[in-house]
Image: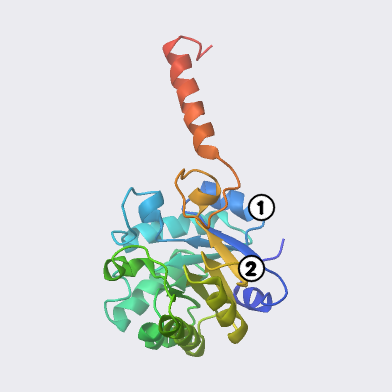
């Protein structure tokens, strides 16, 4: 299989669309890697999928580092991107760089952080230091309190222009790709055509250069999912059934035989 990195991801723009997903442990990272997933994101979505929180905000850097190390040990060909959790880069650029270095030392090939023009100075500093950055504009989940919920962005022309300018700004600052989350598909198409770097959509329509899905959503481990999600399996029922069969067999003396 192809070994994915910054150069191969950038070279895929306009030639190959990439289906990317999250993973948070070695088991699922290995399976995703063996299936040919090009980019595995150790997302701060672990707060909601793995840790039981209502938002991504409570995730700690230490939790990200532990998950990143596990994923990196299992992924042989996929590019591993560590999501910088809330508070790990809003704390001043010096500490933000130090935290990003910890993510790379844990095994990440790149880091992801949210924001447009407001984080460009940090993006430039990180990339100058040799830390690849995957940017994230549009609906940024770490701003959920500012939005008043997980709400679609860029719906008016004024709001759309802000997303466009943010995307251009992070490209100019040195980001190798940019996530477009929960924006109209027409806006995502406009940004994808404008930028030289790849766009990675999530709830942003089909025109982006790549797509993200949260692992638990695409596998059907989450039974309530956003409307844009396609579930490629329905594992929640299977897993629940297996647990129940095990409990029943132990209770009834069937297992161990």
Which class describes the residues within 10 Å of circle 2: few (<14), some (14-19), or many (20+)?
Answer: some
Name the residue at the front extreme.
156
Residue at 44 percent across and 87 percent down: it is: 124
Check disc 1 and report its element: helix, strand or loop. Answer: loop
Of marks 2 and 1, which one's residue comes earlier in the chain?
A: 2
Q: Nearer the viewer, residue 173 or 5?
A: 173
- Rendering coords of residue 247 (x, y %): 43, 20
Image location of residue 40, percent across then percent down: 54, 61
The CA distance from mark 2 to mark 1 is 13 Å
Task: Tell me: residue 211, above or below residue 127.
Answer: above
Labels in figure, total: 2
The residue wearing badge 2 is 4
At a point 67% along the width and 57% down the height, the residue shown is 36
In this view of the protein, which residue sits in the foreground, 172 or 148? Answer: 148
**Quadrant position of residue 10:** bottom right
* Residue bearing the label numbered 1: 35
Disc 2 versus disc 1: nearer the observer: 1
Most foreground residue, 47 or 65: 47
The circle on residue 160 is none
Q: Is residue 85 visible?
A: no
**x%, y% of residue 88?**
31, 71
């Amino acid at each position: 299989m192809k070994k994915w990195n910054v150069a191969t991801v950038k070279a895929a723009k306009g030639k190959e669309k990439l289906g990317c997903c999250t993973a948070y442990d070695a088991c699922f990272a290995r399976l995703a890697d063996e299936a040919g997933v090009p980019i595995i994101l150790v997302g701060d979505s672990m707060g909601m999928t793995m840790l039981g929180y209502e938002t991504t905000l409570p995730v700690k850097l230490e939790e990200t580092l532990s998950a990143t190390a596990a994923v990196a040990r299992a992924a042989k060909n996929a590019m591993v991107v560590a999501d910088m959790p809330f508070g790990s880069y809003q704390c001043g650029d010096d500490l933000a760089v130090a935290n990003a270095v910890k993510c790379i030392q844990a095994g990440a090939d790149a880091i992801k952080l949210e924001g447009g023009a407001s984080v460009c100075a940090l993006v430039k500093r990180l990339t100058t230091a040799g830390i690849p950055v995957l940017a994230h504009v549009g609906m940024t989940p770490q701003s959920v309190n500012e939005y008043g919920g997980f709400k679609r962005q860029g719906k008016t022309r004024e709001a759309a222009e802000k997303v466009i300018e943010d995307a251009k700004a992070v490209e100019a600052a040195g980001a190798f790709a940019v996530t477009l989350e929960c924006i109209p598909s027409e806006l995502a198409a406009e940004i994808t055509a404008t930028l030289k770097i790849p766009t990675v959509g999530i709830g942003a329509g089909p025109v982006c250069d790549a797509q993200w899905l949260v692992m638990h959503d695409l596998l059907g481990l989450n039974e309530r999912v956003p409307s844009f999600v396609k579930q490629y399996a329905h594992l929640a029922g299977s897993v629940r059934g297996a647990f129940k069969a095990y409990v029943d067999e132990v209770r009834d003396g069937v297992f161990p035989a």
